Structure formats: C-alpha cells, structure tokens
Amino acid sequence: MKIIRSRKNAALMTSCIIFGFILGKWSENITNSPVVRQQIDINSNQLCACQCNGNEMKEQDLQAKPEGFVAKNDNGVNKGNDVILGKRFRKPRKFFIDCGGNVASSVVLFKETYPDAADFYIHSFELDDRLCPYFAPFKNHTLHCPVAVSNVTGEITAYAEAAWFPGKSVGGEDKQWGGGSIFVSKNESVRKDGGERMLSYRKKVPAVDLSSWLREHVTQEDYLILKLDVEGAEYGILRKMLTEGTIQLVDKLYGEYHSDQPTGADDKEKSQIKADLKVKKQSMLRWIGERKTYHDFEFLHPTKVLESRYAPNAANVVISKCGMTSRDRNQVAIVIEVGMNKKPAIWLIETIRAYKKKFPCTIFVYGDFATQYPQLVRDWSIDFDIGVRGSSPQLEHIWENLNYYYTRMSIIGGAMRLSEIGMEPVFILPQRQSNHTVRIAQKHGYWVVDPNASFPPRKGTQFTEENYFKYRDVERVPRALRSISDALLRDQGGIISLDADLFDSYMISVFLLDYLFENSQFQLVGLKDCYD
C-alpha cells in the first residue's frame, strides 16, 4: 500500500505554485454552510505534497478487465479488450475510488464481497489523519490521507470528531463514527467542543478537486466504481463532475446524500443535481460500509435454488442426520472442520486419506484458509468434497449473535474465496447455527450442515479437565469414541464432525474408522448421498 502524506519540499512547492497560478480557477471558494465559508489556499505546502508526490499511476497499477468486458470510447463504440494508448496496447483498468474512507470499512466490504474485487485497484481518500493506520493492511491500494475531496483544489480546514471518552455523546447517541467534514454549521465552527457532532479536532488538510483528479488518472476505457460518502461535500463534487463531463467516467456510483447536514447547496440545487444525474443515466446507489451492505448486494449475489438432489428427503435447509438405506442400516457421513491452523489439518486429513479403505468425506474450510493455502485445498479436493465455514473464525458465542449483514458477508465472502480457486461449495458448516445463517443459506442456495455427533461435543455433556483432558492419550481415546458412538446410536446414524484444531481428532481418527467399518452397523456415505 502506498501512503501519500504531507511533506515540505521547496522545489516541489515552487512547481506547484506555478501550476496553481496557471489554473486560476483553483482559487474558488468552498461554501461550508450558509454561514461558514472557507477560502482555498493554493499556496499550501500540503497541497504541493499532495499534487506533486506520488499520484502518478504506475504500470503495475494497471488492472485487467474481466474476460468478455466491452470497453467504451467517447462515442460509446466498442473498442474490444485492448485499448490503444499512444503507440502501445494495454488492458482497461478497474478502479474502486473510496471517498470518505473512514476506518476502511468500505475497503473491507468491497474486498470481501464484491465480484472480481481482486481485479480492482483501490484509492481511498480520508481527511482525518488519525484514521490512516486502518488502511495499512491492504494491497493494491493507495491511501490519500489526510486529503479531503471537493470541487476545488487547495488547502482547507477539516473538522473531525473528538477522540472517544467515557460519557461522550454524539447527537444524543452513544457512538464513535470517526472522520469528519469540511462542511459545518456556525455552531460547530465556533464551539470548542465541536457542537452537536463534537467536531473539535481541526486541521488544515489538502483539498483535491475530484473531477480534475479523475480526468487525470482515469480514462473512458477504464471501469470505475465511485463511492462518495463525504458528509455534505457530495453535492458540489457531483455538480462539478456534471458540468465538466467527468461523470461519464463513472460506471457505477455508490454513496450517501447528507441532506440533513450543512452542504453549501440549497434544496433546489440538491434536487437539480439528482435530476441531472438521472439525465446522464446515473443515480447514487446506497452504500453503507459500517453496516456491511450496499444497494445491489442481492443483485450481484442472486438468489439460488437449493439443489434438492443433494438432500432429496431433507425436511429443510439444515442437514443433521442421515436417512435409512434399503438394507435397513443407518447411514453416517464424516466431515472435517478445518480452522486456520495448517499443520493439525494436514495431520488429520492425510491420516484419513491413508486409511486402508476409501470412503466419501467433506472438508470444510474458511475462505481465508483457502486464500492462504489455495494449492493445499485444491489437492484435498481431488479425494474429498470441499465445503465452506465462512470467511474467518469467530468465537462461537460471537458467531451466533452476529447481525444479519455480518453473517451474510462471512458466508458469501467465504464462498467467493473458494470460487476464486475453482470450487463452488453447496454445503456450509458455520461454527454455530443461527436464524440468520439458515435464512442466508436458503436464499443463496446452500445446505447448512449441523452435525449431531461433533467432536469435541458441542451439545450435551462437554469435555472438561475432570471428565476428559486429565487422562492420558490411551484413556482419552475410548472416552472420545464413546461420545461419538452414543450420539450415533441415539439418532440411528447422522453426521460426525472432527475439529482439526484439536489434536485428539487426529489421535482418534483411525480408531474411529476401524469401529465404523468393523464393529458398527453404520454405512459410511457422503453428504451428497446422505438422504438417498
């Protein structure tokens, strides 16, 4: 990740000042509200650093379009996948421009759930320098911080939220939303505590004319998604983009209108901007990064019909028990739950793979595990079915209490990571069941696996030091096997899950298979055959 920060450099300052005088329109005013106005300082050292240091696009930033993408020129004529730039050819690029980056919530949501997100290069603009660390983990990303996007270029005062303290209240609510605005009310501008939004942290920052920036860095052939959540500055920015025609560079517009905050535009102008966008066949789709959702999420991840062939006799989307075979023997399916620990997972899975008899088995992995070890998961898929657990592990009591949107992001994001390495899972096995899990699975075409014979047990008597862990290996094995056997006998079969993170799953694996094949009346089947 590249970070563009403010630095003093005399030579760069001189070149920027000269360039600023050439474009006299940079000296326009920003209207912060009907009361508060700010004058742009075109001679700012910070402006010089922002404009002159590092905004150039490098060759490695060029991102290819998805196969079949049709590029467009100024006349809407198909140029094909290759675009002529001077005397060379390149693939069209894909950009996600994140204006109002805040705590990188939009970057996380985009990377986790947006189709082909890995093909996009991301630029984030955030005016609050205290939030810069949130963007440090991300690759294929440039952070412009502290930088405010506007309809003019220069230096401006950013009004940001005060640091949290016990008893703090914003607008009468207990919250810490982070970031700030360049548009404030008279009350917020004069009060030391920052008024109703507590915007008491104030700092001069560079302001960038977004319309000009897009014209400089994006071409008509590129695919551009613009997210605009800038606390009132959106109206001036959109008016400038409409006037200069740079709105035509935008393929999809996300964001939020802040009509109840100071914006520098009256109601008539706000309505006219929306009407003019409609004429240009544009509308601002709702993007709410802090809630982990956006307007067309369900459209981009459409509802799928549950494939009944995987469980033709299942009463609902949740599968926990296997039916009876024609020979009146109960059926048992074995699944393996892989965490984020590669070593114990390999121990367990390779031991089962080496067993003297072959049998169907499903391995459930997190999306993050598949991203970190793609070749390992592909290797497992040769002999085993692969299902998804979610994006990444959570504490079990946390998972079952997550809201709908976080749960959806984890399930869809995890499935997308498997899809990226060539697998389309039909089964999910979350850490815990919840109403949200079932609802999301049913809507998006996944069967939820809820093992009735989990190891270690999640239902009934739990393992403790006193009843299990204080014993030696040779004494724990029969206790573990009895726990699994009791659950199968009680339910006349079912689904056994082995948690790869627990060493004892590896330790009991061969003994368990010997019991099932040699001394039980159960028939081992795959999840896809569990209800045949």
Image: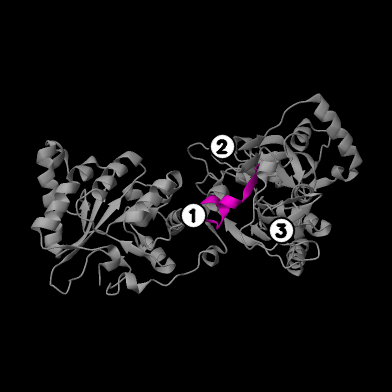
Quadrant where the C terminus is found in the figure:
bottom left
Picture layout, residue 386 above or below residue 103: below
Give percent across and percent down for residue 477.
13, 44
**Label drawn at residue 136:** 2
Look at the numbered disc 2 and give the secondary structure of its residue.
Answer: loop
Which residue position holds label 1? 420
Give percent across and percent down for residue 264.
76, 52
Residue 57 is at least partly visible in this image:
yes
Look at the numbered disc 3 and give the secondary structure of its residue.
Answer: loop
Labels 3 and 1 touching (C-beta < 8 A): no
Q: Residues within 10 Å of mark 1 (few under 14, many from 20)?
A: some
- Which residue is drawn at the image coordinates 23% and 52% (left, top)? 458
Picture layout, residue 318 above or below residue 85: below
Sequence-wise first label, 3 or 2: 2
Q: Is residue 121 magenta?
A: yes
Q: Amino acid at mark 1?
A: Glu
Sequence-wise first label, 3 or 1: 3
Instruction: Report the magenta residues as a range.
Output: 111-126
Image quarter of residue 344: top left
Q: Nearer the viewer, mark 1 or mark 2?
A: 1
Which residue position holds label 3? 250
Q: CA distance from mark 1 to mark 2?
A: 24 Å
Instruction: Classify residue 9 as left or right of residue 229.
Output: right
Q: Nearer the viewer, mark 3 or mark 1?
A: 1
